Image (cartoon, rainbow, N blue to C red):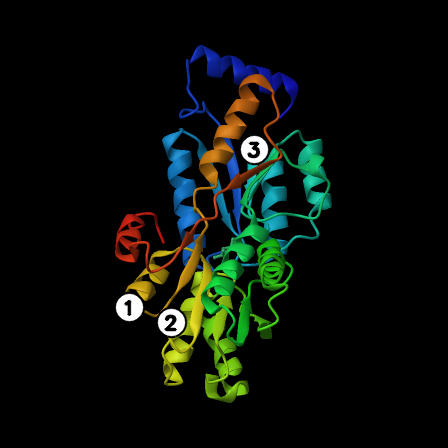
Amino acid sequence: MNILRKLALSASVIALGCTSAMAADLTVGFSQIGSESGWRAAETSVTKQEAEKRGITLKFADAQQKQENQIKALRGFIAQGVDAILVAPVVATGWEDVLTEAKEANIPVILLDRGVDAPQDLYLTSVASDQVKEGRVAGEWLVKTVGDRPCKVVELQGTVGSTPAINRKKGFEEALAGHANITIARSQTGDFTRAKGKEVMEGFIKAENGGKDICAMYAHNDDMAVGGIQAIKDAGLKPGTDILVASIDAVPDIFAAMVAGEANATVELTPNMAGPAFDALDAFLKDGKAPEKFIITESKLYTPADNPQGEYDNRKGLGY
Ligand code: AHR
């Protein structure tokens, strides 16, 4: 967006008396990773709802988990001259060229839910959780729950090279530091999917005395945890009791598992990244003021003590 276009847009926003809930005539491209998890599906539908609420035309591109598809989509959005781009980057590296192209075309880019290894001046802002904190919250819960007992943990990691996989591992390890009784015995990627989570957990169970040596399963998202819970049940063990289950996202299915006594802790990740992103974009277009570089969403811990049935019911209708 060049300065004349931005001024024209600002003028029309003022003339129309639009509020932040009504961005005038904006076309925004959204490159979504895919649909690997319930959380991702909810983020997609919330983004569409938030755009509609504001009268924004959203051009949606599903990258089917491939960075090359995301880069193609971004180049397509640039060629079409969209007013802004939202991107949920599947992995952290490899973005510099295309972000530079967007910058040269004066199209602001907003990162949603994951980060990139690229200079910060190549994007307007990033709306995401503190992913290190998410891992730390899950780890602190485990430390508190296990006390002095020896505890072998198995870890289901997210997509290799993605910031949530890197940071949720880091935060969890930070929480465990100094607690020599708790060790991460095995750690492997389950790519944030239910099917892979189940498959990887089956392997861990086989390798750990039919699962009898495992004290806790830590999954970087709830979908992998739900897959892992199935593997634990298939092995004749009780998830939530024989093997503690901690994960991240707070999707309805993990609350259903808590109600059934099969999950012990989850850290909430809001699927509403687009609301704060559109608000930041709106303010930027109105007065040209750059938003905070990092807009951080909350990371709240939920356990079976937090009315899991109510939390399940609250999340209905969000597109999970
Ligand atoms: O980047 C956020 C993560 O990506 C969510 O925790 C996970 O469910 C998704 O696939």
Q: Nearer the viewer, mark 1 or mark 3?
A: 1
> Image point 39% across, 46% down: which residue?
45
Of 252 and 30, nearer the camera is 252
Q: Earlier in the sequence, mark 3 or mark 2?
A: 3
Q: Nearer the viewer, residue 71 or 92?
A: 92
Circle 2/circle 1 CB separation < 8 Å? yes
Residue under label 1, please give it. 260
Query: Mark 1 vs ligand 1: CB under 8 Å?
Result: no
Label 3, on which residue?
A: 84
Q: CA distance from mark 1 to mark 3?
A: 44 Å
Disc 2/disc 1 C-alpha distance (Å): 9 Å
Q: Earlier in the sequence, mark 1 or mark 3?
A: 3
> Is 144 or 199 nearer to us in this picture?
144
Give the residue furthest to the front.
Answer: 148
Q: Is 276 displayed left or right of 117 in the figure?
A: left
Task: Residue 240: give its label.
Answer: 2
Residue type marked 3: Ala
Residue at position x 50%, y 74% in the image: 149
**Quadrant assignment for the N terminus:** top right
From mark 3 to mark 2, how far is it between C-alphas?
44 Å
**What amino acid is labelled 1 in the image?**
Ala
Q: Which one is in front in this view, the residue at disc 3 or the one at disc 2?
A: 2
Q: Is 272 drawn above or below residue 316 in the view shown?
A: above
Residue 81 place in picture, x, y as percent: 59, 32
From what the image shows, is residue 291 above or below residue 286?
below
- Given the image, on which type of amino acid does mark 2 rest? Gly
Residue 221 on image: x %, y %: 48, 61
Q: Secondary structure at mark 2?
A: loop
